[in-house]
Image (cartoon, coloured by chain):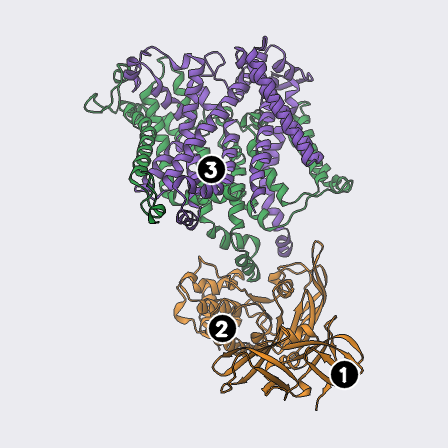
Chain colours: A orange, B purple, C green
């Protein structure tokens, strides 16, 4: 019923559409900001673009929105080529990091703005605004100005303004990053619920991997304008394509030790074990996640290291050790106790070790063989 | 159609302004240049134009109007020689320093033009005023610009600094000090004629007392010029004041308080913190003021009609009088000379002072 | 030890951080009060003169109304009862001209400033020079050879459209937004005297001399650089997110400008409007050229009071100046809080 009210006044179709990004490039003068990005987003999918700042994810999103021109390549929304189409004809809605609420307009005017621009009648706008506001639970705040709202409420106004357009595609540029930690968790859940309910294709940009993991159907991880890996959250977490993805996903991040492989034998800082199916390599990085390993007595594990600090976070204990100057973090049960300064061993299942080429960062399909 | 409009709206937004400026500013500018090389006679149903080459300019610089535009020249006095030669040496030293340190053709040619203008003004000054001769409208205009701007800058800045302090009645001072800027220059001219009247004006008793009871400001060349500068300053100090006040208020309180905590006195805190912050703004404000000051015409016209003789006539006023005498060629030539002087001086100031300050900022 | 840390205080030294010493305060207030007197006394004299008779003015200085002299309303009556036609006509002319010129200038100027701050332009220099060349040729053919101005304009427009692209391809040198901005702002350097004679002749050709339109357009153009300069920096300080969002929400450039940008620029617009209004209201030289009787503005009327055979009628002049000041002061008081804030944006970055 509410969806219909909005639909009647809306300028757009409201059916989820697939997005096809083909060899998209962006140049700022000589600077190559986005390199040959190709992604096919299915209709109704929630895709997260994840990466550190300056990786080109926001640029990609702004190009999809039409706020930046596409230097080369193609962009299709549905079956329509929109490479040269102005933003407002692309059938999209966007939520900005700053929310971009118009400070001189009330909440109702802000939410109703897209319909006003589409020349809907005041009655249509009014009922659609109420419906959209109800959907994000803003009902009683319609006459306030954005300056009088809390961060979370502003966020909801921005969402309502995006919903009211009934777009085929939602674009979100770090929409939760201006909220405090607790609110962020709540809004994340609400966003996910809402996206599932409306079923609108969504592209979401963030640098926060927890948001990416929890929200996405698929995650696209980017670095320096290049797509590193595209896959489900589980895939990118448990089967990283390269050193960068492995190091970027997970908190605390994956531990790495450096070494080399000669004759099926890995030797590196304080650890040595046999590996299967590996060619000789001068520089290899071996990674393991803090939650995949345990602290054992000195000499009983794969390697030994000195305990540097012990942090109690409530639900678990984070032990940071130092191995020849490099930190290694181990997540232990909350009842675990150890003192800083002692030397301890670290052990893990061999299948939880990841091997990477130390120079290119590429994943080496090698498995460890430990006794 | 709608989409075409959307795509070309950027140009349509800029077009009206550009068209208006092209038609009512650039076109007249070109037309004026053409007229400066012509003799124009009004005849029944229009006007006749005859090109005379550089004649209009020659008349101003070397011919019958020389005294009027640049002044009378006889021999240059000893003082004139000393001043002229020393400034010339200083200017040459400055450009030699530029050539030695960092040389680009663009910068060099620009500085050569600045140098030429500097030398011209220096020898104009040395040849007329320092040699006991009369100077013309260019000298008078430069007097208005330099002396006027200096007075306005010092007083306007001082008042703004005082008002930027935490004092009572700030708003009242601010409103009162702004008032003269709102009065039409014509009005300012008449008001100051009343003020300066030594027999019937408000200060006539003071004049009597100091023995200047029948002195007339408008009859003495220097008194008349100073009198115009005072009126001009009265009107324009508010502009400097309001801009500098905003500049002073934009200095972070944290910085000055930190300086005070570090042991700086009021003078040191002003010199080390406040002044460097407002200096770039001050340079811009004075550039704007100087550009407007070169155009001065209403005050001399109302207060003295350019007299006594031509003592208070500005270049603009001279061009206006030439126009009134239907000598359109000379009017345009004089106006172009003014434009040239203004552009060279203002662009030099902009490049060498304003931009230099901006470049120094991190 | 401690004596070294607290040296002898000078009388100007502040007793605490962020405060002033008594001596500093005395010096400050003295300066400010002297300047207040210097600013206000001429205005006071102007006001009392407007209530004086010829005798009160001519027999020497009288300072206090009702004490030194008996104030009379004769000058006010003269201007608003006897000569009311002239006065009111000039007054209404001034109001119409300065309001229209300010409106036009602020509207067109801020549109241009907005476009320059948001849209990237790259016009070809050669095409522009070709356009100016055609403009000059049109002027010459009208002015010197007496060609009918409609014909000349039509030929120039046709030539431009046929040849612009061909000429532009001769040499590619593109200008950018900064160049256009500088070009517009630099028009302010032009002294009115440089352009006023051709403008006079242009309006004479199209028979618009001594009309409101001629003066309105001229004032709008003369003040446009100020508008563009102040508003450009102001628009630059508005976050782009808002406009991009409006754009995605389906607003056109006009819609964004009207719904989002203008309401957010009230401060800058108020300061700019006031400044342009003051400049147009007080302008003298251009009005002197472009008006004779019908479109005569207040400054011309005031200046003309000098021309009488009885010498200057100080009392009437004072009345005229006072009625000229009143609306500007009223406007300034209304817009007071915007003035310094709005003006500074330009100066700091300009």
Q: Which SS class for mark 3?
A: helix
Subunit ID for the residue under disc 2: A
**Which residue is at the front of the view, B105 or B308?**
B105
Q: Is residue C171 above or below residue A146?
A: above
Horizontal side of residue C72 vs A139, given as left or right: left
> Can I make out residue C99 in this image?
yes
Dot 1, crowdedness within 10 Å: few (<14), some or many (≥20)? some
Horizontal side of residue B81 vs C320, given as left or right: right
Label whose residue precedes the other's in the sequence (1 or 2): 2
Taking the view exactly as shown, the residue that stands out farthest to the top is B74
Residue that badge 1 annotates: A265
- Residue ID at (42%, 61%): A147
Dot 3, crowdedness within 10 Å: few (<14), some or many (≥20)? many
Residue that badge 2 annotates: A184
Q: Is residue C314 above or below residue B107?
A: above
Q: Position of residue B246 (x, y in %)?
A: 43, 42
Q: Position of residue C38 (x, y in %)?
A: 33, 28
**Which residue is at the front of the view, A14 or C129?**
C129
Q: Is residue A314 above or below residue C108?
A: below
Q: Position of residue A119 (x, y in %)?
A: 52, 61
Whether labels 1 and 3 belong to a single chain: the reply is no
Spatial CA distance of label 1 from label 3 is 82 Å
Q: Which mark is residue C276?
A: 3
């Amino acid at each position: 019923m509410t969806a219909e009210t909005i639909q009647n006044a809306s300028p757009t179709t409201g059916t989820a559409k697939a997005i096809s990004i083909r060899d998209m490039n962006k140049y700022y003068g000589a600077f190559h900001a986005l390199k040959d990005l190709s992604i096919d987003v299915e209709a109704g999918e929630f895709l997260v673009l994840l990466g550190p700042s300056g990786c080109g994810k926001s640029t990609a999103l702004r190009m999809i929105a039409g706020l930046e021109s596409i230097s080369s390549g193609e962009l299709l929304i549905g079956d329509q080529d929109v490479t040269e189409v102005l933003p407002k004809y692309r059938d999209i809605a966007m939520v900005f990091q700053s929310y971009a609420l118009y400070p001189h307009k009330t909440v109702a005017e802000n939410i109703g703005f897209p319909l006003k621009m589409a020349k809907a009648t005041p009655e249509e706008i009014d009922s659609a605004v109420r419906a959209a506001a109800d959907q994000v639970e803003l009902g009683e705040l319609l006459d306030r100005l954005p300056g009088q709202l809390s961060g979370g409420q502003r966020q909801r106004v921005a969402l309502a303004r995006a919903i009211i357009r009934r777009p085929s595609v939602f674009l979100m540029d770090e929409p939760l990053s201006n909220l405090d930690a607790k609110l962020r968790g709540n809004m994340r859940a609400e966003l996910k619920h809402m996206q599932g309910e409306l079923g609108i294709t969504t592209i979401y940009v963030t640098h926060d991997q927890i948001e990416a993991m929890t929200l996405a159907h698929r995650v696209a991880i980017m670095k320096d304008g290049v797509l590193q890996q595209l896959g489900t959250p589980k895939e990118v977490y448990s089967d990283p394509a390269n050193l960068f993805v492995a190091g970027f996903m997970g908190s605390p991040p994956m531990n790495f030790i450096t070494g080399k492989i000669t004759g099926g034998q890995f030797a590196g800082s304080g650890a040595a074990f046999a590996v299967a199916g590996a060619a000789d390599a001068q520089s290899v990085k071996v990674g393991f996640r803090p939650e995949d390993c345990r602290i054992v007595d000195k000499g009983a594990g794969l390697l030994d290291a000195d305990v540097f600090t012990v942090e109690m976070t409530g639900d678990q204990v984070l032990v940071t050790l130092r191995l020849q100057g490099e930190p290694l973090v181990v997540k232990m049960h909350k009842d675990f106790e150890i003192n800083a300064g002692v030397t301890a061993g670290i052990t893990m299942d061999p299948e939880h070790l990841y091997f990477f080429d130390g120079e290119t960062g590429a994943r080496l399909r090698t498995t460890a063989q430990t006794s | 159609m709608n989409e075409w409009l959307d795509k070309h709206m950027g140009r349509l937004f800029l077009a009206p302004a550009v068209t208006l400026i092209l038609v009512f500013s650039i076109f007249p500018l070109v037309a004026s240049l053409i007229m400066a090389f012509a003799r124009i006679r009004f005849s029944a149903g229009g006007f006749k134009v005859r090109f005379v080459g550089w004649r209009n300019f020659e008349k101003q610089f070397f011919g019958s109007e020389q005294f009027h535009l640049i002044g009378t020249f006889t021999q240059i006095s000893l003082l004139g020689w000393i001043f002229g030669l020393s400034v010339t040496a200083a200017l040459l030293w400055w450009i030699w320093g530029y050539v030695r340190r960092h040389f680009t053709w663009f910068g060099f040619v620009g500085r050569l033009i600045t140098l030429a203008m500097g030398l011209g003004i220096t020898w104009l000054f040395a040849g007329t005023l320092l040699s006991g001769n009369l100077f013309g409208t260019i000298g008078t205009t430069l007097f208005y610009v330099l002396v006027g701007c200096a007075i306005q800058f010092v007083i306007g800045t001082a008042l703004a600094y005082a008002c930027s302090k935490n004092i009572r009645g700030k708003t009242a001072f601010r409103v009162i000090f702004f008032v003269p800027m709102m009065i039409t220059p014509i009005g300012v001219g008449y008001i100051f004629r009343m003020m300066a009247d030594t027999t019937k004006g408000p200060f006539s008793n003071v004049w009597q007392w100091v023995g200047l009871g029948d002195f007339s400001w408008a009859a003495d060349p220097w008194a008349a010029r100073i009198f115009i500068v005072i009126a001009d300053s009265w009107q324009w100090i508010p502009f400097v004041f309001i801009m500098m006040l905003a500049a002073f208020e934009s200095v972070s309180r944290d910085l000055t308080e930190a300086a005070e905590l570090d042991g700086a006195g009021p003078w040191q805190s002003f010199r080390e913190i406040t002044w460097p912050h407002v200096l770039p703004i001050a340079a811009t404000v004075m550039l704007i003021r100087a550009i407007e000051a070169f155009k001065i015409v209403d005050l001399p016209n109302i207060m003295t009609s350019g007299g006594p003789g031509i003592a208070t006539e500005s270049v603009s006023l001279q061009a206006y009088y030439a126009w009134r005498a239907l000598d359109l060629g000379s009017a345009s030539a004089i106006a172009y000379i003014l434009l040239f002087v203004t552009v060279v001086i203002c662009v030099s100031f902009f490049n060498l002072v304003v931009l230099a300050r901006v470049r120094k900022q991190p | 030890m401690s004596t070294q840390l607290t040296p002898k205080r000078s009388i100007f030294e502040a007793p605490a951080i962020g405060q002033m010493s008594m001596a500093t305060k005395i010096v400050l207030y003295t300066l400010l009060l002297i300047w207040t007197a210097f600013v206000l006394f001429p205005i006071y004299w102007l006001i009392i003169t407007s209530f004086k008779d010829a005798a009160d003015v001519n027999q020497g200085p009288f300072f206090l109304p009702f004490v030194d002299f008996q104030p009379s309303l004769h000058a006010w009556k003269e201007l608003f009862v006897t000569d009311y036609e002239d006065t009111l006509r000039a007054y209404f002319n001034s109001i119409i001209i300065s309001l229209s010129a300010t409106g036009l200038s602020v509207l067109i100027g801020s549109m241009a400033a907005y476009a320059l701050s948001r849209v990237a332009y790259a016009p070809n220099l050669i095409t522009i020079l070709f356009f100016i060349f055609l403009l000059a040729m049109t002027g010459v053919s009208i002015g010197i050879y007496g060609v009918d101005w409609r014909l000349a304009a039509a030929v120039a427009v046709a030539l431009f459209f046929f040849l612009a692209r061909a000429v532009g391809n001769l040499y590619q040198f593109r200008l950018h937004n900064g160049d256009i901005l500088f070009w517009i702002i630099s028009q302010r350097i032009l002294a009115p005297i440089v352009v006023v004679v051709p403008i006079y002749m242009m309006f004479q050709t199209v028979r618009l001399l001594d009309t409101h339109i001629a003066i309105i357009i001229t004032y709008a153009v003369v003040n446009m650089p100020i508008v563009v300069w102040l508003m450009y920096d102001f628009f630059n300080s508005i976050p782009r997110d808002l406009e991009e969002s409006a754009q995605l929400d389906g607003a056109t450039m006009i819609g964004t400008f009207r719904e989002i940008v203008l309401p957010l620029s009230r401060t800058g617009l108020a300061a700019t409007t006031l400044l342009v209004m003051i400049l147009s209201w007080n302008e003298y030289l251009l009005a002197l050229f472009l008006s004779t009787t019908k479109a005569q503005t207040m400054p011309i009327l005031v200046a003309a009071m000098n021309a009488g055979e009885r010498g200057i009628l100080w009392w009437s002049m004072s009345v005229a100046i006072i009625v000229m000041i009143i609306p500007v002061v009223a406007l300034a008081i209304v817009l007071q809080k915007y003035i310094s804030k709005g003006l500074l944006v330009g100066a700091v970055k300009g």
